[in-house]
Structure formats: structure tokens, C-alpha cells
Amino acid sequence: MNAPERVERPNPIRALGLLSGGLDSTLAARLLMEQGIEVECVNFHTGFCIQSHTGAMRNPKPGAEPARHDALHAAGNLGVKLHLVDIAEDYVRIVTDPKHGYGKNLNPCLDCKIFMVHKAFEMMQTQGFHFLFTGEVLGQRPMSQRRDTFPVIDRESEAGGWLLRPLTALRMPLTEPEKLGWVDRERLMGFSGRNRKPQMALAARMGIRDYPSPAGGCCFLTDENYARKLRDLWAYRGARAYSMEDILLLKAGRHLRPAPHFKLVIGRDEAENYFLSGFVEGRTLIKARDLPGPVTLVEGTPSFEDLTLACRIAARFGKARELPEVTMTLESAGCKESRVVKPLAAHEVLEDWHV
């Protein structure tokens, strides 16, 4: 797809930006707004956002105050419209088979950026925007924000010269909106590298003070522990595939696989216990009777003996660990039963069980 030719100066000039809610994307939007450009933003949901999961875990109960959504918060502070777009279903192929490979863990950063920019470019064409912008900074991210990868993003997303990066524009070739005089290049920035102090100074000048930690992570796929759990899931399934429920469960609890055919997910606090209790369908839920302790989910194809072992492991991680015996309740497919077991000793929980 090619962007339509534009000769006359639009009035107003409309730009669509990818807004994470972080400092960089917020500053990029403000730089264009200061030039009188009408800005709207889009935030894409992939299912792997750390912030959205953390918010859900901190506010798990019905009626709890919703956790702050950084992109919505930033859009509100900017006074711009935010489009929230769920791309999780289409995003599966990006995670399972990235053309440009993974980063340090299972993060397909370059394919991810190409995919999101392409989605935004489609919105640009169908919703009357004149160009796109992002908060990318040359040299800030090792996989997707390099001088040699920016042209790849521009080309493979099909956005071409219609993608502007206001924070690093002075270090990059002219884009179409700059060539056409829609954007004053002299009022853009030439930031580069991983140092965020220039952005923080610009934010102070603009009066922007309420923003997340500038160097904070945003995606579970960059996390070593999460990537290990996802690889374990793929190994068990024998295929690179996942459901939305799978990726939610990988974000919570302590994961142990005592045998290849079954796994335990053990809650680490009250919030995780509450969260895990919502995933009993298709699994076995275990907890101690009348004693504080974790909610434990068992998934896979456990035998009777496997479930007894699972009860002993679950008891080990609760208040029952010091008792000679404890009664554990098991719930599966609407049926409940009880088993009296001896909690495992610490040395009996093998290190190679931990995923």
C-alpha cells in the first residue's frame, strides 16, 4: 500500500502516534502539538504488557479501584484522543515465528515494531491522518532502534517516509511531512543513545512531570523468567503456540514441573491466589483445608499419584509445612475431594522442577 499523494497543505494537519504512555512517546506527541498539529494516538494490546498484568494483580477483586493505564493517563494529560486496539490474536504469529528473530529472550522487537507501525499505517490511511509518529530514539533499544533497523521498519511496515520520529529526527533523513513543510524540522530533536536525561530535561521544560520510570520495561517477552516459562510450555506442547489463557497464567505464581506431563502453578500471595482461582476450568485446584496457604493449579495429564505429589508440594509452600500431616482439598470439573498428605521437606522439592 502506498500513501496517497498530497500536494496542498492540509488544514488541519492530522498525525497519528503510537503511544505507550512512557516519556518518549508523550514527548513526541507534545513536540508536534506545539507546532499546531492535530494529534491522536493509538495503543496496541498484545497480551504481554507488564503494566496491565501488574495492575490486575494489584487490584484483583471486584469493585477495586482500576489500576492506572499509562497510555490512557498520558493521553488524558496531553488532551488527545486515544485509540485502544487489541491485536493479541494477530500477534501470535509475531511471537511464534518472527522473521527477524528474537532479542535476548523471546522478544521479537523488530517484528513487533514493524507489525504495530503497519497497523497504525492502515489506520492512517482509512481515518484521514496525514502521517505517523513514534517516540523512538536512535540507539536506545539494541534490537529495533538502530540506524540500520529504522529503514527496515519503514520499508516492511509500508509506512515509508510517512513515519516521523520527532525525538531523533535531526539524526535521520527528511521524512515526507518535513519535505512538504507540514512539520518544522528545526523544532524537532536529535536525541540518541540510552541516556534519558535529555528527555527528562525536555519534559521539565514542557511541564511534564507525571510519567513512568523512563527506563522501565514494558513487555513480558523481554523477561528471562517469563521467556523460560513460555519455552517450557512450547516444549510440553511440542509446538510454538499459545492461547490468551496460557500467557496470563505464565505471568502469575511459582511454576514447577515435577514430570514432563504435568505442571503446578503455585500462588505467592493473596492477590495471586485470587487470580489463579479464576482458572480452575480444565485444571485441578488444590489448597489446604482450614489453613493459610497458596492456591495451586495443576495442569497437564496427572495421574492419581501425581496429584498426591502435587498436594504434598502445595502443602510445602503454606503454613502446613511444619505439620506431620495436612488435609488438602482438590477441585476439578466440578468435583471435590480431600487427601491427607505429609508435606514435602525442603530438600525433596527438587531444583530442576522449577521452571
Image (tube, grey):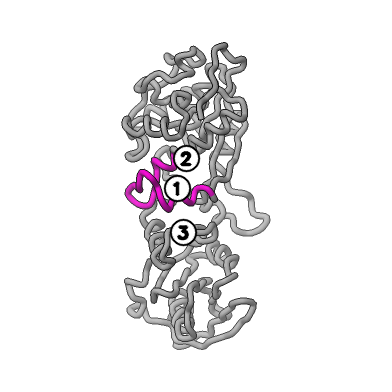
Q: Is residue 92 above or below residue 296?
A: above
- Residue stretch rendered in magenta on the structure: 90-113
Residue 207 drawn at (x, y percent): 51, 25
The amino acid beneath tag 1 is Ile
The amino acid beneath tag 3 is Ala
Mark 1 or mark 3: name the one nearer the start of the chain.
Answer: 1
Q: Gap in Å between the C-alphas at discs 2 and 1?
A: 8 Å
Q: According to the image, label 3 marks what residue?
A: 241
Q: Is residue 165 above or below residue 89?
A: above
Residue 156 drawn at (x, y percent): 42, 35
Residue 78 seen in this snapshot: no
Q: Secondary structure at mark 1?
A: helix
Q: According to the image, label 1 marks what residue?
A: 94
Whether the magenta-drawn stretch holds residue 335 is answered as no
Badges 3 and 2: C-beta atoms under 8 Å apart?
A: no
The quarter holding residue 291 reads: bottom right
User: Which residue is more in the foreground, 220 or 259?
Assistant: 259
Instruction: Report the residue at 37% width, 30% height from top.
Output: 151
The furthest residue to the right? 63
Residue 175 seen in this snapshot: yes
The amino acid beneath tag 2 is Phe
Instruction: Report the residue at 57% width, 28% height from top.
Output: 125
Badges 2 and 1: C-beta atoms under 8 Å apart?
A: yes
